[in-house]
Image (tube, grey):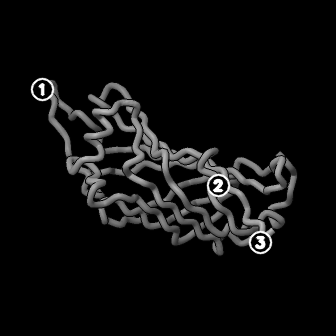
Amino acid sequence: MTTATTSSLTGTYVFDVSHSQIGFTARHLMVTKVRGAFNEFSGGGVIDFENPSNSKVELKIQGESIDTRNADRDAHLKSNDFFGFAEFPEITFASTSVVKKGDTYAVTGDLTIKGIGKSVTVDFDFTGTAVDPWGNTRIGFEGKTTINRTDWGVNWNTALEAGGVLVSEKVDLEFELSAIRNAETA
């Protein structure tokens, strides 16, 4: 990791999807967690370290790329019972504000799932910067938030005989993002 000043890092960035991950966790049978990820996504934005309120971030996730390491579960998640990816193939996020709070950046924006947009805030930690062997400036962020999937019409569930439900409404979203600065803004 280099020791570049944050002012020298301001610019336009594109997510390096081969070195990034967008994951999620939900409870199954209320006793264990099921983890998954979306393997295909794109995005980036303008990151202004000196004046974070000038920053903008966009993300597009290809729903069909959902991966929970179980083909039957993935097919069920892709169906109309859950996400309905045939009709709504993308999940999107577009920031509406970025606020620096100590070492954390609170990124608020519109998360759209199944055609329903709702405001969410993701708290991101800046994990550092480096210049790669090809001369590209890279930055890293890790963030997480918790949403209620029913707010986006992802309602399917089954009641359990002993009480509770098969799938939790609460879903934890986790982001590990590496971004490369556009050479034109360097």
Mark 1, secondary structure of its residue: loop
Give whichever of discs 1 and 2 has the lower sequence position.
Answer: 2
Give whichever of discs 3 and 1 has the lower sequence position.
Answer: 1
Residue 101 position by quadrant: bottom right
Decide: is 56 above or below 36: below
Q: How many marks?
A: 3
Q: Amino acid at mark 3?
A: Glu
| Residue at image coords 55%, 44% | 21
Mark 2, secondary structure of its residue: strand
Q: Position of residue 3 (x, y in %)?
A: 87, 51
Q: Position of residue 177 (x, y in %)?
A: 62, 50
Quarter of the image containing the N terminus?
top right
Within-10-Å neighbours for mark 3: few <14, some 14–19, many 20+? few
- Kindly identify which numbered label has been placed on residue 104: 2
- Can the viewer see residue 36? yes
Q: Position of residue 132 (x, y in %)?
A: 81, 49
Tag 1 residue: 161
Q: Nearer the viewer, mark 2 or mark 3?
A: 3
Decide: is 60 above or below 167: below
Q: Nearer the viewer, residue 25 or 137?
A: 137
| Residue at image coords 64%, 52% | 16
Residue 89 position by quadrant: bottom left
- Tell me how far mark 1 sits from mark 2, CA to CA: 43 Å
Q: Position of residue 82 (x, y in %)?
A: 25, 48
Within-10-Å neighbours for mark 1: few <14, some 14–19, many 20+? few
- Tell me how far mark 2 sits from mark 3, CA to CA: 27 Å
Mark 3, secondary structure of its residue: helix
Q: Nearer the viewer, mark 3 or mark 1?
A: 3
Tag 3 residue: 184
Q: Amino acid at mark 1?
A: Glu
- Kindly identify which numbered label has been placed on residue 179: none
